[in-house]
Image: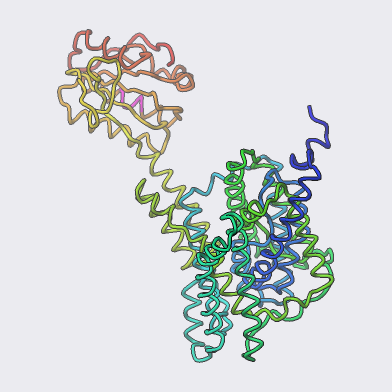
Amino acid sequence: MPSLPASVLPAWLRGYSREDSVHDLLSSLTLMVILVPQALAYALLAGLPPQTGLYASLLPVVVYALTGSSAALAVGPAALPAMMTGAALIGFALPQSELWVQAAMGLALASGLLRVGLGALNAGFLANFLSQSVLGGFIAGSALSIMLSQVPAMLGLKVSAANAPELFRQVWQQHGQIDPHVVGTAIATLLLLWWGRDAVPALLRRLGLTPARASLLAKMWPVVVIILGAVAVAALGWPMRLVGVMPSGLPSFTWPSLSWSQWHELMPAIAGIALVGFVDSFSIAQTLALKRREKVSPNRELVALGLANVAAGVTGASPVSASFGRSATNEMAGARTQMAGVFCALWVCVLLVAWPSAFQHFPIPVLAATICMAVLQMFDLHVLRLAWRFDRREAMLYLATLSSVLLFGVLPAIVVGVCASLALVLWRSSHPHMAVLGRVPGTEHYRNVERYEVQCQPGLLVVRVDESLYFANARFVHEALQERLAQHPGVRRLLLVMSAVNAVDLSALDALQNLNRDLQTQGVSLYLAEVKGPVMDVLRPSGLLEQLAAPVFLSTHEAVTALSDAPQPSPGPTPAGPGAGPAA
């Protein structure tokens, strides 16, 4: 059993070397250059003062580094939690007001405590409650919602809307106040950022840089564009909103000042941020772990992300999450461990203490355009295309979640997505696939008559049920078997293959007994084959097995062979059989 320090410390820290520290220190400079403008932009996206984004890049990063199970995950300010925070607080307070800031801190603190509690209860399985279709639709819808939310800032307007229809309504009401200088600045920023996605890496490669180095340096292009935008706006003297002067120094430890009624009002948002933040972060951690051949623990990630958010909530920041873009940049820059994030947090500390005025001339429209381009990669239609080819119902689930984000907002969309996915699961299990089987010639294998050229025995119908039997599908299975018997009027034996049945509940047991009685009145005998041990444990004390015409068969072939050689039962009630056979 490992010692306590070895079990508590993250794996990357136990064998940390001087060589690792050099790589992490150098890569942290690259990460800091990319992180700072993103932190400012995501704070504005959340409706918060810009310095709160930098606060989210300090203690939360250090806390996750010391508690998380992923050596590569970059935790801090991110688009998704920022957008969810801003959407949750509309109508609760005015953006950038003291109450808004306190509420954002409360969301971070409470969602963090919730995750810590769930992690302590080993509830990491919650990552499975958002299907790939729901999560993909939610992220794509969130990306569109984030881009739409930045449109007012790129038009020079002030809008506060929780969904797309309300945003369009407010923009239309204020369309006479659109500032052409702001629009021109935003369009120029978008064009430069779009051009730089492919042109800058290509230019750097032509200058002799390796593809990896060129790709890494190209990630700093948005920072260059922001600086160019600030210089251009100042030189032209165009009036527009700027980041402004930020308070110098580090954040102090404080508790969110909210009343019990205000905490209660924030509860749905707290639960939504906790669930979506964990699922999104854990999916990123898994992707990175596969590339690095590492293992991440869902329960430890729950606790680590929870503690990081608690740290954010008591240091004046909003909820934090993982950033796939910064995680990938970290790796490209040569970072080996989470210490790169710790070093980056130290660089941000230096900026806040020594040079807080460095960002005061950044134009808000330029940051808004930067946000739009940053979240564009979140709008990935690969999941939708895959779902459309795989199962149209999954594609509809994706589109329903995406539409819900735009029409109703992020929190209602979570409810819609989860409820829709659960409804789809229930529908599938309540309408199980059932196949009539026949023997593949020359073998002992039995396959679906609709998919293979098979041989069927006259007077014998072999049906396989491909789902566990429970209250939601018991009636469906009963009726479906009767329909198949009606399609085969000469059948006097029905063999039910239960190789795919893992469980049977009381309702399904009652349905099987009713089916057996109905079949007896029709002169049809019921037989079972390939029943699993746990199912046999349920059937034995029920008395059903004693009512069957033969013991349970170990295999389908054994059953078909035995029933083909046996004399055909005459129409009318079938006498009780000899009882249960062995479990499969």
Can you tell which quarter of the image residue 309 is in? bottom right
Residue 497, horizontal then vertical, whole percent = 34, 22
x 39%, y 49%: residue: 387
> Foreground: 207 or 101?
207
Residue 270, horizontal then vertical, whole percent = 65, 59
What residue span does the magenta drawing correspond to? 512-516
x 78%, y 68%: residue: 257
Q: Quadrant of the C terminus?
A: top left
Q: Is residue 513 magenta?
A: yes
> Foreground: 482 or 83?
83
The reply, left or right, for residue 13 in relation to residue 441 is right
Magenta region, main secondary structure: helix
Can you tell which quarter of the image residue 238 is in? bottom right
Q: Is residue 306 magenta?
A: no
Would you say residue 543 is visible in this rendering?
yes
> Foreground: 514 or 359?
359
The reply, left or right, for residue 95 in relation to residue 513 is right
Location of residue 495 with respect to 374 vertically, above or below: above
Would you say residue 271 is visible in this rendering?
no
Location of residue 363 with respect to 135 vertically, above or below: below
Location of residue 577 with respect to 40 vertically, above or below: above
Residue 281, horizontal then vertical, whole percent = 61, 51
Residue ranking furthest to the left: 490
Residue 193, horizontal then vertical, whole percent = 54, 71
Q: Quadrant of the N terminus?
A: top right
Location of residue 370 with respect to 65 vertically, above or below: below
